[in-house]
Image (cartoon, rainbow, N blue to C red):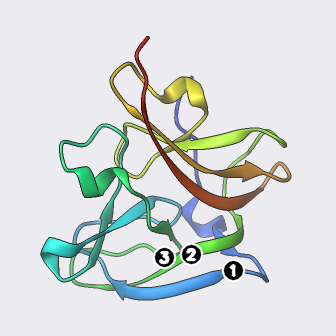
């Protein structure tokens, strides 16, 4: 399996979305998972479940726009998001080991942390609900 294929132009906030704004500290594409880097003025950077940086394993939200380092960003932190890719309704989606990636549980490799991003409520909408399990895949 592979990460969810996202078309950035199709990422849309839902009517119940909670959104925060800030600055990106790296190149980010709409639909990617980001964390806030407290060591770099709380800039948004790409999260991933196998990062050597503990903070990068804790998602803050999903980027609603694309940008390069230093540019403004809108990040959805709660609510429904049209993710710009095809989901399997009812299935949980997790933070991937690929920076910014979203995938099914099969994408979490041995040694990676399980971090739930949300559940698919339809073929295009992800109901965000971040849950950092603290558990690492052993086998």
How much space separates mark 1 and mark 2, taking CA atoms? 6 Å
Question: Residue at the spot x=27%, y=58% of the render?
Answer: 55
Residue 83's place in the image compared with 133, above or below, is below
State the image quarter where residue 90 is shown.
Answer: top right
Q: Is residue 112 left or right of residue 4?
A: left
Q: Residue 104: in sight, yes or no?
A: yes
* Residue 21 image offset from top left, x and y in percent: 44, 88
State the image quarter where residue 27 is shown.
Answer: bottom left
Disc 3 crowd rating (10 Å Cα; few below 14, some 14-19, many 20+) is: some
Disc 2 crowd rating (10 Å Cα; few below 14, some 14-19, many 20+) is: many
Q: Nearer the viewer, residue 27 or 108?
A: 108
Question: Residue at the spot x=47%, y=28% of the render?
Answer: 108
Which residue is tagged 3? Answer: 65
How much space separates mark 3 and mark 2, taking CA atoms? 10 Å
Q: Is residue 12 left or right of residue 132?
A: right
Residue 14's place in the image compared with 139, above or below, is below
Which residue is tagged 1? Answer: 17
Indicate the secondary structure of the residue bearing disc 2: strand
Residue 113's place in the image compared with 111, above or below, is below
Q: Is residue 91 left or right of residue 12?
A: right
* Residue 101 image offset from top left, x and y in percent: 46, 46
Which residue is tagged 2? Answer: 76
Question: Residue at the spot x=37%, y=36% of the render?
Answer: 97
Q: Earlier in the sequence, mark 3 or mark 1?
A: 1
The residue mark sitting in front, 3 or 2, is: 2
Disc 1 crowd rating (10 Å Cα; few below 14, some 14-19, many 20+) is: some
Q: Nearer the viewer, residue 95 or 101?
A: 95
Q: How many marks?
A: 3
* Residue 68 image offset from top left, x and y in percent: 27, 74
Q: Are marks 1 and 2 in contact (CB under 8 Å)?
A: yes
């Amino acid at each position: 399996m592979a990460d969810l294929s996202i078309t950035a132009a199709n990422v849309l906030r839902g009517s119940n979305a909670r959104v925060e704004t800030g600055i990106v500290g790296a190149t980010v594409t709409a639909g990617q998972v980001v964390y806030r880097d407290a060591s770099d003025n709380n800039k948004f950077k790409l999260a991933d479940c196998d990062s050597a940086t503990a903070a990068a394993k804790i998602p803050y939200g999903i980027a609603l726009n694309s940008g390069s380092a230093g540019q403004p960003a809108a990040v959805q932190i709660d609510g429904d998001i049209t993710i710009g890719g095809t989901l399997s309704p009812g299935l949980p989606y997790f933070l991937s080991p690929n920076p910014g990636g979203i995938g099914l549980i099969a994408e979490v490799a041995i040694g990676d942390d399980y971090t739930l991003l949300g559940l698919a409520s339809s073929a295009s909408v992800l109901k965000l609900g971040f849950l950092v399990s603290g558990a690492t895949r052993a086998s």
